Amino acid sequence: MKRERHEEIWDFEHELAGGGGGPKLILGLDGGTTNTICICMPIIPFTSNHHHSPPVYARAVAGCSNHNSVGETAARETLEQVMAEALSKSGSTRSAVSAVCLAVSGVNHPTDQQRILDWLRDIFPSDVEFFVENDAVAALASGTMGKLHGCVLIAGTGTIAYGYTEDGREARASGAGPILGDWGSGYGIAAKALTSVIRAYDGRGPETSLTSSILHQLQLSSPDELIGWTYADPSWARIANLVPVVVSCAEAGDQVATDILLHAVQELASSVKAVVRRLGLCGKDGKDSFPLVMVGGVLETNRRWDIGKRVISCLVKDFPGTRPVRPKVEPAVGAALLAWNYIIEQSHQEHSDVDYD
Amino acid sequence: MKRERHEEIWDFEHELAGGGGGPKLILGLDGGTTNTICICMPIIPFTSNHHHSPPVYARAVAGCSNHNSVGETAARETLEQVMAEALSKSGSTRSAVSAVCLAVSGVNHPTDQQRILDWLRDIFPSDVEFFVENDAVAALASGTMGKLHGCVLIAGTGTIAYGYTEDGREARASGAGPILGDWGSGYGIAAKALTSVIRAYDGRGPETSLTSSILHQLQLSSPDELIGWTYADPSWARIANLVPVVVSCAEAGDQVATDILLHAVQELASSVKAVVRRLGLCGKDGKDSFPLVMVGGVLETNRRWDIGKRVISCLVKDFPGTRPVRPKVEPAVGAALLAWNYIIEQSHQEHSDVDYD
């Protein structure tokens, strides 16, 4: 399929023509179900430690780029626009780009990857390196400074667990979206909470303070209005926005809300366990140390009822070597670091090739 | 909101002008999530017994008319078109219509009802009687020949339990769609089956024969292709079509498939129980007899693993007076009979008013 031309997106390049001369660039892109972030990073040496963050020239933000959620045409337009904006903001053109690492949710199959690669080749000069991954890969890289090793658990609007071994094997669990049972996701938690309100209302389930809290939050007066509200807009993120209400109800002691969160914890832990077991990240005796990068609103540590902390408690029982990491950079930077590491390694290899010739 | 004009839908009436002279008519309409059926019934006396079916002049079929599923504009166009087609097929015009009973899934709130009523008044002459109900009401009426009493359980693509007492109280349970936990529906059963395949594939759940059976049915080669398949088309009915595969796997002894069906049975029974308890259909001692009208593909009795029969077994434990009814007419006829009963009762009342004057 030939891509639809959006040449006007790149009009800014005409004004910059003749500029250039700066360092070569990497575009790192993190495309989630809620929004898409693109950063532009120069290929200059830096030390990754607590005092130095990787240099970032520019950052651009756009909406959802999951093709399963918004469709392929809309997803591509979002991706192209956000890359152009990041380049434009850093005063550069596509000719300065060395590598693009595009990590997007909804990339689940080699055919998804291939379609996006073909499309990228049509946009950028022929010498650009491309990396197309699921957004989980960028999140892992954001916790390991670009090194692919360990496991990442993302739980925002959606959820996925993804792992990578030093010898290049990879595995994932969940990340199949709301219809296919991502019950630990923000969407899953909120949908269960809405369902509990309906069940209490029609006499199938216990009373819960979720009813008054959710109705108040959405400014509705009766649970049967929830049906219209739910189907008025198919956005997964809109439903997932109710997670803080569920957490508040659990904190206040509501049993239904508590059970929903406990179930989510089990689901999230089971995704990580499946990945760790399949890859043997925990070693033969189950005690090897491995990083577990934790990303996403559901795992944030700012609440008394702390979902992320409970997931870790659940995991260390089986895998005492679980080493939780809260990334210091965002996944889009992780995506760029992934490409950065690859380019640096390649140039080391070229130099050593020369040495041995 | 003024309705969008679709006058061309009614063009056939010009050719029929001056005809008429036949009996007055009722339009009965059953709008489900999968399709919409409209029948046209003359207001002539008939005896409802095993030998006589209600007279039907014409029948028209269209697609989904649930506004939560296809949006309001598409739903209305479908409804208007299917009513025009039924009238046109019976060689009549809107001036011959005495009553319209529109029973559509997705009518969950008085505001839904009011919006559709306003819209109908704009289409039909001012002396037409309108009845706007959830499609569950038509299904109940199809099992009771238009009399509103008892409980109906629908389980097709969606599911709802709805009940009505002789003194006019009503209650419903479920029917809130897939996001809000209708787990006994065809969609719910199939989504759980798809989820089980994903869970087995990524190591979170037990192996199941659902994997090979569903992949074979959909002509896919790997479970990760299920994600693309699932989100390629948001139709609930398309997912629900997988129910026979789940039943076959359960019949062949697959434990995962069996557990999914057992869970659906519990969910369906719990919806009926909630309605029966709230309305007191079972009487004070819980033993009163009441009709339970059973409708929809999930409850059909043509399989060895019989979901409907198991729901009944589950119910009679609590309510020994449960009297299962398999309707002999379709819900669209039930909708028409509902209006028919109302009109006949009203005319009896008018006659008795005359008697006492």
Image: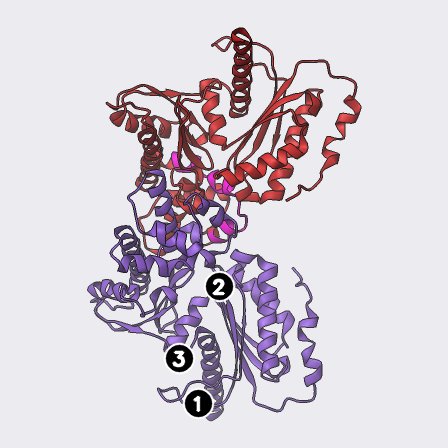
Chain colours: A red, B purple
Residue B145 — which label? 3
Q: Is residue B174 in view from this perspective? A: no
Q: Position of residue A98 (x, y in %)?
A: 63, 21
Q: Secondary structure at mark 3?
A: loop
Q: Quadrant of residue B186?
A: bottom left
Residue stretch rendered in magenta on the structure: A227-248
Q: Give the CA distance from mark 2 to mark 3.
A: 24 Å
- The vertical placement of A335 against B40, above or below, is above
Between tags 2 and 3, which lies in front?
Answer: 2
Q: Earlier in the sequence, mark 1 or mark 3?
A: 1
Instruction: Please give the residue where the numbered disc 2 appears in the rendered image.
Output: B34
* Mark toward the start of the polypeptide (2 vs 3): 2
Image marks 1 and 3: residues in contact by CB distance under 8 Å: no
Mark toward the viewer: 1 or 2:
2
Looking at the image, the residue that sits furthest to the front is A357
Of the numbered discs 1 and 2, the one sitting upstream in the chain is 2
Q: Residues within 10 Å of mark 2 (few under 14, many from 20)?
A: many
Residue pictured at 60% horizontal, 23% vertical:
A99
In the image: residue A185, left or right of residue B64: left
Report crowding for label 1: few under 14, some 14 to 19, many 20 or more residues within 10 A (C-alpha): few
Q: Quadrant of the N terminus of chain B?
A: bottom right
Position in image of residue B356 (x %, y %):
45, 91
User: Alpha carbon of mark 1 to alpha carbon of mark 3: how far?
Assistant: 12 Å
**Which amino acid, mark 2?**
Thr
Q: Which mark is residue B46?
A: 1
Q: Residue B294's image quarter?
A: bottom left
Residue A249: give x, y in percent of width and height.
37, 37
